C-alpha cells in the first residue's frame, strides 16, 4: 500500500488568506483524525487529498507519484472517499450502490462478476445492511444510508480510506462498529484519514491527529501529543472537563 504524502500543502478556502502549509505522511497502518470547528476546512482538505479540488499550493503524493499526474482510475484504486453528504439522484438499490465500489477495478463496459458480487455481499453483511440489498437507497434512513456508503468503499477495497464524519447519523452501536472496522482496516495495512466531530471517538481510536483552526493554523502528530485540553479548548472555543476512562482520555463540555 502506498503512503499518502502531503507536502507543503495549502488548501484553497475561498476568501481565506493562505494558512499554514501542511506537511505529513499518512502511513499504512495509521488512523488519522482531523479535528476542527465548523468551517475550519476539514471537508476541503479531504476533497483536496482525494484530488477533487486543486490545492492553492503544495503537492500530494501517492507513493512516489504526484496525485495530480495520476489517472482517476489509478487514484480510485488506491483512495476511497466517504462523503459527508450525498445526493441520490439516480434510483439505485443498495446492492447496485455497493457494486459501484468495483468500478475502478473493471474495464469500461465490463459487467461485475461473481467475485465482485461476493465482495459487495460481504461488505453489506459487515455493515449490517444485507437485509436492505434490494431497497432503493433514497428510501433508507440516514444511518442506513451512511452504512451503505461505507459498505461501498469496503467493496472498493482501497489502500487508503478518506472519510468525512463517518459516524454521522449512526447510533452508538454502529458508531463503535464503524470505528472497529476502520481499526481492522488499519491493522491489515491500510491507512485511514477521517474528519471527526466527536473528540472522544478520536481519542479512543485515532493514533494521529490533525488540528485545523479556522485561521488556517494547524498542528499534527501522534494523538497523545495533540490531545492537550488547553489546545482542544482553544480549537473549539469550548471549556472542557477532562478525565480518563478505560485507558483513553475523555472530554466533556463544561455546561455553563
Ligand atoms: N464553493 C465555496 N464557495 C465559498 N466558500 C466555500 C466554498 N466551499 C467551502 N467554502 C467555505 O470554506 C470553509 C471551509 O469549509 P469546509 O466544508 O471545508 O469546512 P469543515 O471544516 O468541513 O466544516 P463542517 O465542520 O461544518 O463540516 C467554510 O467557511 C465554507 O463556507
Image (tube, rainbow, N blue to C red):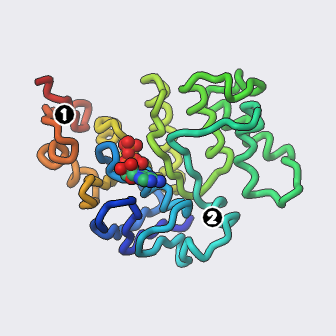
User: What percent of the width, then of the height, locates residue 36?
Assistant: 30, 47
Q: Is residue 255 left or right of residue 192?
A: left
> Which secondary structure lies at badge 2?
helix
At label 1, counting other C-alpha atoms closer than 10 Å, the crowd grade (few under 14, some 14-19, many 20 or more) is few
Q: State the residue position of label 1.
A: 244
* Residue on which the image places disc 2: 75
Residue 28 appears left or right of 13: right
Instruction: Please say whether residue 42 is visible from this viewpoint.
Output: no
Q: Which mark is residue 23?
A: none
Q: Quadrant of residue 133?
A: top right
- Point out the tag, 2 or 1, that comes first from the N-terminus: 2
Q: Is residue 70 above or below residue 49?
A: below
Residue in the picture at 73% in, 46% down = 100
Would residue 111 be visible to someone looking at this image?
Answer: yes
Per the image, label 1 sits on a secondary structure element best described as: strand
Mark 2–mark 1 CB contact (< 8 Å):
no
How far across and down, in percent of the image, does residue 108 sit?
Answer: 84, 59
54 left or right of 87 in image: left
Q: Nearer the viewer, residue 256 or 81?
A: 256
Amino acid at each position: 500500500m502506498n503512503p499518502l504524502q502531503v507536502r507543503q500543502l495549502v488548501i484553497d478556502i475561498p476568501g481565506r488568506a493562505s494558512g499554514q502549509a501542511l506537511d505529513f505522511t499518512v502511513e499504512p497502518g495509521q488512523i488519522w483524525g482531523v479535528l476542527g470547528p465548523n468551517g475550519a476546512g476539514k471537508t476541503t482538505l479531504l476533497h483536496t487529498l482525494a484530488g477533487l479540488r486543486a490545492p492553492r499550493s503544495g503537492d500530494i503524493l501517492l507513493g512516489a507519484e504526484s496525485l495530480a499526474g495520476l489517472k482517476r482510475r489509478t487514484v480510485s484504486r488506491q483512495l476511497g472517499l466517504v462523503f459527508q453528504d450525498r445526493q441520490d439522484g439516480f434510483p439505485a438499490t443498495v446492492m447496485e450502490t455497493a457494486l459501484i465500489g468495483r468500478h475502478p477495478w473493471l474495464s469500461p463496459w465490463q459487467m461485475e462478476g461473481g467475485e465482485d458480487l461476493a465482495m459487495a455481499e460481504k461488505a453489506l453483511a459487515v455493515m449490517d445492511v444485507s437485509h436492505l440489498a434490494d431497497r432503493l437507497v433514497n428510501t433508507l434512513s440516514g444511518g442506513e444510508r451512511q452504512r451503505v456508503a461505507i459498505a461501498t468503499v469496503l467493496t472498493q477495497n482501497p489502500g487508503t480510506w478518506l472519510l468525512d464524519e463517518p459516524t454521522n447519523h449512526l447510533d452508538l452501536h454502529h458508531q463503535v462498529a464503524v470505528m472497529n472496522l476502520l481499526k481492522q482496516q488499519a491493522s491489515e495495512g491500510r491507512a485511514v484519514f477521517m474528519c471527526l466531530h466527536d473528540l472522544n471517538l478520536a481519542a479512543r481510536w485515532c493514533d494521529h491527529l490533525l488540528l485545523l483552526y479556522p485561521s488556517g493554523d494547524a498542528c499534527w502528530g501522534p494523538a497523545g501529543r495533540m490531545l492537550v485540553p488547553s489546545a482542544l479548548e482553544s480549537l473549539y472555543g469550548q471549556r472542557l472537563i477532562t478525565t480518563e476512562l478505560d485507558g483513553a482520555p475523555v472530554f466533556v463540555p463544561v455546561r455553563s
